[in-house]
Image (cartoon, rainbow, N blue to C red):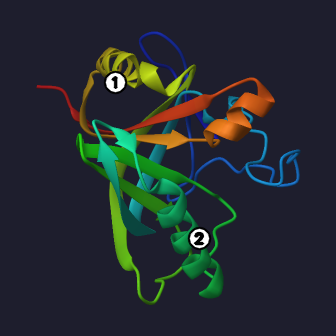
Amino acid sequence: MVILPSASRHVRVMETNRVPKYDPSANETGCCPRFDPEPWRDQALHFEAKAFVKAKTLALFHVPLNMGGVFAKTFEAITNAHADSEEFVVLSRDPTPFTGEHLFAVTRPVPGQQNVTLSGDFLTHVFEGPFADAPKWCKEMEAVVAAKGKRIAELWFYYTTCPKCAKHYGKNYVVGVAKVATAQ
């Protein structure tokens, strides 16, 4: 890992197409493992055609309606294709108030699913709090990225635990993952 100085703090740089690993054995709930935010804090990620499966959910003013079913079906397809990634991450965003897009990291294409790749430079920032804080997180991500002399080209969030598990663990960590471009 390389440490690069920045205007306000250090940024850690991961190897191409890598994200911080998580410990699936730290799982008290049988659902979501306990999330360690430290490896995700202020990371610089670089993806070159990183493989993902893309899924869409329905929402009502950004509140997901069918996320559980869509995620279960997608995870089942990924597992059946033996495309699970040791570096688990699902990137989510809401392109409209009525639609969610989710990118599931995979190791190979998954039959019957929408296979996509993602390329570019990304900066991460860890948040903790209720999902209702997402609008504040968007503004804070803009400031974090601007402090690095960049602008956000796309903004994704990695929701590290489901609401039930976040309640159990007493923390609701969410990672902002901003695809960046040079500020203009």
- Secondary structure beneath dot 1 equals helix
Which residue is nearer to you in this view: 43 or 63?
A: 63
Q: Earlier in the sequence, mark 2 or mark 1?
A: 2
Q: In the figure, residue 142 lies in which quadrant? A: top left
Residue 2 image point, x, y percent: 60, 37
Residue drawn at (61%, 77%) of the image:
76
Q: Residue at x 72, y 29 (%)?
A: 167
Assess disc 2: are there few (<14), some (14-19) or many (≥20) residues with their C-alpha within 10 Å of its C-alpha.
Answer: some
Q: Is residue 51 visible?
A: no
Q: Type of residue at label 2? A: Phe
Residue shown at 63%/57% (left/top)? Answer: 88
Q: Quadrant of residue 106?
A: bottom right
Between tags 2 and 1, which lies in front? Answer: 2
Q: Is residue 129 left or right of residue 92?
A: right
Residue 133 place in picture, x, y as percent: 44, 19
Q: Residue furthest left?
A: 184
Q: Which residue is mark 1?
A: 138
Question: Could you give the CA–CA distance between mark 2 and mark 1, rounded to whole angstroms?
Answer: 27 Å
Q: Quadrant of residue 118?
A: bottom left
Q: Quadrant of the image for the C terminus? A: top left
Residue occupying the far top of the picture = 8
The residue under label 2 is 75
Percent across and percent down for residue 54 are: 38, 67
